[in-house]
Image (spheres, rainbow, N blue to C red):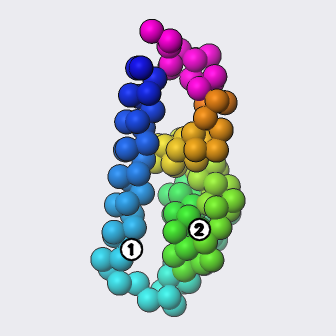
Amino acid sequence: MKSKIIISFCLLFTTLNANNFKKSVTSTQYTNESLRQAFKAHHKLAKKGNVPSQYALGLMFHYGSGVRQNAELAKLWFRRASRKGHPKARSILARFYLEERPLYVARKGAKYGMISNR
């Protein structure tokens, strides 16, 4: 029961964070051209290891903002940002993994004491 509650909270907060980005992009009314320019700038910085740009690229690929929507590339950039400690990238990756491989996530959580069977 505890594990279901914990997983539910993780999914809720991850979804809220992702929705905040989507609202901010829509509220500023970016044009396609400015999104493409933002993509180019973030891509250049992300390749050099800039963590916020890696996260931004993940969001752009996830939502298709300025680029064609691509879940695999979104995961790649979220994973790179996550490895360097970006907390929002980690929570989004956790949601992806939970949706794709729930049993794997449950076993990992149990292994590290995050999920118990009590």
Asked if residue 19 lies left or right of residue 95, the reply is: left
Q: Amino acid at mark 2?
A: Phe
Mark seen at residue 13: none
- Residue 107 locus on image (x, y percent): 63, 22
The Cα atoms of the two marked residues, 2 and 1, are separated by 13 Å
Q: Circle 1: is it few (<14), some (14-19), or many (20+) Cα within 10 Å?
A: some
Q: Residues in magenta?
A: 106-118
- Residue 117 locus on image (x, y percent): 50, 12
In front of the other: 105 or 78 = 105
Quarter location, residue 45? bottom right
Which type of secondary structure does the marked residue at label 2 adopt? helix
Residue designated by label 2: 61
Q: Earlier in the sequence, mark 2 or mark 1?
A: 1
40 versus 59 height, above or below: below
Queried whether the magenta region covers residue 116, the answer comes back as: yes
Q: Is residue 86 visible?
A: no
Queried whether the magenta region covers residue 39, the answer comes back as: no
- Residue 116 locus on image (x, y percent): 50, 13
**Which residue: 59% across, 26% down?**
106
- Residue 65 locus on image (x, y percent): 51, 76
Q: Which residue reaches farthest left?
A: 27
70 versus 14 height, above or below: below
Residue designated by label 1: 25
Asked if residue 29 lies left or right of residue 69, the reply is: left
